[in-house]
């Protein structure tokens, strides 16, 4: 029963030690991005797995954090150019993101399933056009040249640890919620909102609160992202990246919190490393020259993602579960819910 | 308990995957070597894979503190293989490669594509090897990811690129944080990349989107007699920058822009936007910056709302092309058109001919963007602005490297000083850089005219606008906001190229 | 349309006594042009056990939903323990001591039996801000959950995900969800449907064991269960209240027999359905 915690702890320790032997590129670029994407994906996985809400607005909240920081920090270029210090800007940005998530959450909380998906997608699209067209806050050129606080500036390893700490915070928070009364109520809403209402729960409020909570972490990832990326523009929050987040969550396994980071790792890793596989380019020689060469590697990535999803509707973590049950058939013969005994221990 | 024991497996997998990733990167040099052997296949120059590995080192971070300086150029090309300009990926690599073929003795690996790389490039004893080709998609975020891979993983110490504006700003900002790498712009045309970012290691030998329209306002004012104009442009960065060039030029000449209309990108029904424009009897002319299929749709809406086109009342940026006539008839004859990086095909000079011939000699065929990826004569791709921009940037690199005798010490300081001060005698006109390392370039004004012989509308160059700089006589500076919609100050100014345009008669500049 | 629109008063509710547990006053429900419930009046006193009968389409479930707060009446008032709940959503009902079950099981399939029973109690008291961080360990509620589960022969399934229970077990839990809140007013929507004979008997037993002050409103097709549990029967037909009396009276009422029980001839059911 400690397997899950043990496994996560093992990976966590590994990630802490990673900068000792990983290259700067792997740690500062690949893994920092994995952690940030995993962080924002975890906010989606939380909503989806515990609240039954598949949201397309988490990426918007993530982006708004970036735009907020950009507007507050920048001294030249586009936007408000307030010239504030980075740390206070981060705090204000998180407040803005959490408030925005509360607004989006309360406006979407009464819808479910496809209607919820479409409503949150609408918010995402509005966000794209808002920052593109309202030049007071950005314009299509976006916020550029945004520097992180001096503590992180030119210290990619520190930023990596920042992303790791935020990821750990999110993971522990979402796991703690899972067994809290609020989390149980949220899962109840996921399964039977009508019953939950008749039991006395304020269903839209529970949904809104969950969305707001997720929004905080999406915003946290957004702040880290602009510190890491240095820029954000409307295409950063367009449909493509919005769907990328959903893809990350799905390939990782949208019902497992750990899947968020696993999905991000697969997504980023595939993007960076897949095209370097020797000979991939020449596979196409049979059909047409360079048909699977680097400039078409997205096709390859698409096929890989398709493969994962077809093989396991529950993503990569689901694949692992199947492999495991194949090796030890009795271990998962019957799925059992985690429950709590009065003494507080897990069964 | 039956508590998700598979998670242990999951963790093991994750750790293994991480290790594989980390070690993969630890082996960055050998990965590079693999890439090298594929891009520089049949490399017979004697440059061995092992040497590459040694030079690259296992720790990319060492580059920054490499006291001894680089001994070779590890070139990264930042192209764009996806997105709206994805079709021009071949062009960008071909432009870079041709400059190395012409100036550094390189040989293209393939006779039908530049994407397979080149070999044998050497200038003043410095080998130039291709370490990677970045694959942008017209977004800044992707450009940053790609440039990180090129610089931090593949250890490029010189990067040529990128292609489009927002990518350019992102990479110029990235350059600020990576002083050990020299960046030479490909063909991206956002004003901020040089005017505002001012990275000391980011060089741009092409004009920005505003510069390309220099001269159109002047010609419309003088030749077309325009005193007032209306602007209709796509509502995004390039639309704003491109129209700003016309506004700055036209206002400097003494004209006044009385109306601005910015339809969102992707508009299909332009009627409501065209309605906002003044009527033809209320304004002397219209300047159009509507790209893609929007050009015809917008002009059709104009005809429906305001009556027939009168070519002398219209001008446009590079989106305005003879194809308009096919849909809207020959009434458009007389309209002025702004420039792009290279000059139109109707201009023939010995330098241009030599350049295009060298392209045709380097490859049998290329599938560039203009030919829709189909194999075509290489000079078609190289004659167009995208490839040409990369060509000029690489040509500057080659010439500067030659001038400093291959000195790459002290973060390429000698090379950078030479790049900043040199004048590149490029086939379509000479280019030098201003204090922000932004090109001062020649551009052109063309006109859509009726070819009597064929009865069709063709584009004819009417003037070359020499030595256009980024500031438009002070309209733009580091203190002005980047162009957006109508924020360009409309004031009469003296511009260096006003009165100095070189007329072109039958394709021959009258210098 | 309605056969009887007169408000039928409970004999036990006199002036000076506490307000009736449930009071319907001229309740009508209209969906578009269709009148589903027509001017029904009803009063339930403390500890009363009422069976609501009627043929399919008589408006039983709609009336039930009006009481539970899932459907708002077009006209009329609903009062629970003196509080006018007509405009209040279903989620305020548990606070007034109301618990209900569903005709088709509505359980949190992904959660365990214990967690379901826990949530039922949590809903009644409401989620407080502290509950976000505190673990969902609450000895008292857990004990009560266990006791109820054992009463419903689910004691050994406390940790099982509800989605994996058999249908009969889920039906049992459906009732358990209501019982665990220790309601004052218990609304049961066909609790016996889908149960085996043995389970029905246990259900009847469970309901008979309810504390005497629990008020019960029951929709039930199974006459055996309904008659065993109820001390009063009302019959709805075509949206109107046509009968209000004791179980023994209902058996002898010719109108009810004709319209609902269909014992007067083969066409009785047809009349009811038309």
Image: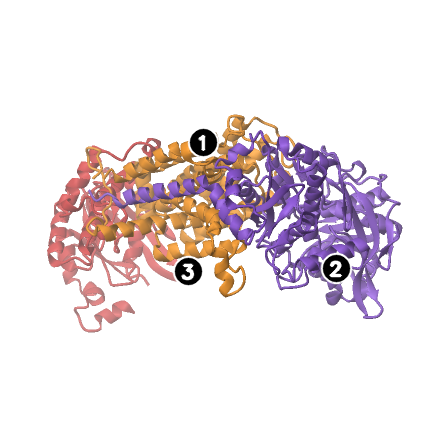
Are labels 1 and 2 on one chain?
Answer: no
How far across and how far down the image is residue A321, in percent? 29, 49
Question: Could one spot residue A43 in this view of the protein?
Answer: no
| Disc 3: CA contacts within 10 A as few (<14), some (14-19) or many (>=20) | few
Q: Which mark is residue B321?
A: 2
Tell me the chain of label 1. A
Rounded to the nearest whole Å, what is the CA distance between mark 3 and mark 2? Answer: 61 Å
Are labels 3 and 2 on one chain?
Answer: no
Rounded to the nearest whole Å, what is the CA distance between mark 1 and mark 3? Answer: 59 Å
Tell me the chain of label 2. B
Query: Which residue is at the front of the view, A39 or B487?
Result: A39
Circle 1/circle 3 CB separation < 8 Å: no
How far across and how far down the image is residue C272, in percent? 26, 67
Q: Which chain did the renderer colour purple?
A: B
**Chain A shade:** orange
Query: Which residue is at the front of the view, A35 or C164?
Result: A35
Q: Quadrant of residue B417?
A: top right
Mark 3 element type: loop
Q: Which mark is residue A162?
A: 1
Mark 2 element type: loop
Query: Which residue is at the front of the view, A314 or A82?
Result: A314
**Chain C shade:** red
Q: Is C66 left or right of B99, judged from the image as shown?
A: left
Query: Which residue is at the front of the view, C125 or C17?
Result: C125
Up the image or down, C139 lies above or below C101; here it is above
Rounded to the nearest whole Å, what is the CA distance between mark 1 and mark 2? Answer: 52 Å
Q: Which mark is residue C32?
A: 3
């Amino acid at each position: 029963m400690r397997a899950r915690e043990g496994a996560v702890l093992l990976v966590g320790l590994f990630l802490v030690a990673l900068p000792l032997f990983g290259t700067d590129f792997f740690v500062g670029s690949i893994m920092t991005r994995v952690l940030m994407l995993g962080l924002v994906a975890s906010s989606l996985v939380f909503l989806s797995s515990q609240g039954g809400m598949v949201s397309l607005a988490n990426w918007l909240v993530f982006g708004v954090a970036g735009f907020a920081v950009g507007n507050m920090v920048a001294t030249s270029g586009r936007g408000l150019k307030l010239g504030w210090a980075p740390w206070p800007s981060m705090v204000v940005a998180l407040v803005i993101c959490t408030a925005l998530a509360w607004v989006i959450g309360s406006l979407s909380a009464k819808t479910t399933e496809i209607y919820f998906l479409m409503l949150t997608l609408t918010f995402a699209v509005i966000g794209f056009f808002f920052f593109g067209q309202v030049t007071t806050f950005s314009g299509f050129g976006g916020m550029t040249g945004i520097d992180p606080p001096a503590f992180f500036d030119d210290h990619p390893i520190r930023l990596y640890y920042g992303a790791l700490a935020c990821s750990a915070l999110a993971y522990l928070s979402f796991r703690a919620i899972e067994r809290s009364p609020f989390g149980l109520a949220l899962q109840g809403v996921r399964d039977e909102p009508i019953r939950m209402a008749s039991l006395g729960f304020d269903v839209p409020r529970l949904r809104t609160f969950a969305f707001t909570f997720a929004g905080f972490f999406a915003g946290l990832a957004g702040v880290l992202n602009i510190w890491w990326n240095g820029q954000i523009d409307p295409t950063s929050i367009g449909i493509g990246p919005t769907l990328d987040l959903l893809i990350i969550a799905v390939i990782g396994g949208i019902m497992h919190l750990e899947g968020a980071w696993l999905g991000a790792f697969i997504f980023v890793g595939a993007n960076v490393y897949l095209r370097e596989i020797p000979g991939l380019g020449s596979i196409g020689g049979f059909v047409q020259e360079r048909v699977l060469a680097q400039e078409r590697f997205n096709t390859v990535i698409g096929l890989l993602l398709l493969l994962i999803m077809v093989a396991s509707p529950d993503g990569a973590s689901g694949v692992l579960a199947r492999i495991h049950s194949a090796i030890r058939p009795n271990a998962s013969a019957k799925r059992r819910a985690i429950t709590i005994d009065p003494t507080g221990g897990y069964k | 308990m039956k508590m998700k024991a598979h998670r242990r497996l999951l963790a093991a997998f994750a750790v293994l995957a991480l290790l594989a990733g980390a070690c993969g990167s630890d082996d960055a040099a050998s990965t590079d070597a693999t890439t090298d052997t594929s891009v520089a296949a049949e490399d017979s120059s004697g440059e061995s894979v092992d040497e590459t590995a040694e030079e690259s080192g296992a720790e990319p971070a060492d580059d920054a503190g490499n006291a001894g300086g680089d001994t070779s150029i590890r070139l990264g090309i930042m192209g764009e293989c996806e997105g709206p300009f994805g079709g021009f990926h071949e062009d960008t690599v071909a432009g870079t490669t041709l400059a190395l073929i012409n100036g550094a003795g390189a040989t293209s690996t393939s006779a039908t594509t530049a994407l397979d790389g080149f070999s044998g490039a050497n200038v003043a004893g410095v080998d130039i090897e291709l370490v990677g080709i970045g694959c942008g998609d017209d977004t800044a975020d992707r450009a940053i990811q790609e440039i990180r891979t090129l610089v931090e993983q593949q250890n490029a110490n010189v990067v040529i690129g990128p292609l489009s504006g927002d990518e350019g700003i992102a990479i110029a900002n990235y350059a600020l944080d990576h002083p050990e790498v020299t960046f030479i712009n490909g063909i991206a045309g956002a004003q901020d990349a040089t005017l505002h970012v001012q990275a000391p290691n980011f060089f741009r030998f092409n004009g920005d989107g505003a510069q390309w329209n220099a001269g159109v306002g002047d010609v419309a004012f003088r030749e077309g007699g325009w005193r007032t104009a209306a602007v209709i442009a796509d509502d995004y960065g390039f639309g704003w920058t491109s129209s700003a060039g016309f506004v700055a030029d036209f206002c400097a000449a003494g004209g006044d822009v009385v109306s601005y209309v910015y339809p969102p990108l992707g508009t299909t029904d332009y009627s409501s936007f065209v309605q906002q424009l003044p009527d033809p009897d209320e304004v002397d002319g219209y300047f159009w910056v509507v790209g893609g299929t929007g050009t015809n749709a917008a002009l059709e809406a104009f005809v429906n709302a305001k009556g027939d086109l009168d070519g002398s009342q219209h001008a446009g940026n590079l989106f305005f092309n003879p194809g308009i006539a096919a849909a809207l008839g020959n009434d458009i004859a007389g309209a002025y058109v702004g420039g792009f990086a290279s000059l139109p095909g109707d201009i023939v000079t010995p330098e241009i001919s030599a350049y295009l011939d060298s392209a045709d000699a380097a490859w049998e065929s290329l599938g560039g963007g203009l030919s829709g990826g189909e194999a075509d004569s290489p000079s078609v791709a190289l004659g167009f602005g995208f490839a040409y921009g990369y060509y000029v940037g690489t040509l500057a690199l080659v010439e500067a490297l030659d001038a400093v005798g291959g000195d790459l010490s002290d973060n390429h300081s000698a090379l950078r000083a030479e790049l900043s001060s040199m004048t590149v005698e490029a086939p379509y006109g000479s280019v030098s850089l201003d204090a922000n390392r932004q090109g001062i370039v020649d551009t052109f004004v063309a006109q859509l005219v009726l070819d009597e012989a064929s009865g069709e509308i063709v584009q004819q160059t009417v003037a070359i606008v020499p030595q256009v700089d980024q500031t438009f006589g002070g309209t733009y500076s580091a203190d002005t906001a980047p162009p957006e919609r109508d924020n360009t100050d409309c004031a009469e100014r003296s511009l260096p190229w006003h009165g100095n345009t070189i007329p072109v008669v039958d394709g021959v500049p009258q210098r | 349309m309605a056969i009887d629109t007169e408000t039928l008063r409970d004999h036990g509710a006199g002036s000076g006594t506490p307000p009736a547990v449930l009071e319907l006053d001229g309740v009508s429900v209209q969906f578009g042009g269709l009148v589903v419930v027509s001017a029904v009046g009803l009063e339930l006193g403390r500890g009363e056990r009422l069976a609501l009968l009627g043929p399919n389409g008589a408006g039983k479930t709609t009336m039930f939903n009006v009481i539970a707060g899932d459907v708002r009446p077009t006209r009329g008032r609903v009062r629970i323990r003196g509080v006018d709940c007509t405009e209040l959503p279903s989620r305020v009902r548990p606070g007034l001591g109301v618990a209900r079950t569903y005709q088709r099981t509505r359980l949190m399939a992904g959660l365990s039996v214990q967690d379901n029973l826990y949530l039922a109690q949590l809903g009644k008291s409401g989620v407080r801000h502290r509950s976000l961080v505190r673990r969902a360990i609450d000895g008292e509620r857990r004990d009560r959950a266990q006791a109820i589960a054992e009463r419903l022969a689910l004691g050994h399934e406390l940790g099982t995900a509800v989605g994996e229970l058999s249908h009969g077990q889920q039906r049992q839990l459906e009732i358990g969800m209501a019982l665990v809140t220790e309601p004052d007013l218990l609304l049961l929507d066909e609790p016996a449907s889908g149960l085996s004979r043995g389970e029905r008997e246990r259900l009847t037993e469970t309901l008979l064991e309810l504390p005497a002050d629990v008020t019960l409103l029951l929709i039930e097709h199974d006459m055996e269960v309904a008659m065993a549990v109820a001390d009063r029967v009302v019959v709805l037909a075509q949206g109107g209240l046509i009968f209000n009396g004791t179980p023994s009276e209902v058996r002898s009422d010719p109108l009810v027999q004709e319209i609902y029980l269909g014992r007067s001839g083969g066409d009785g059911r047809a009349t009811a359905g038309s």
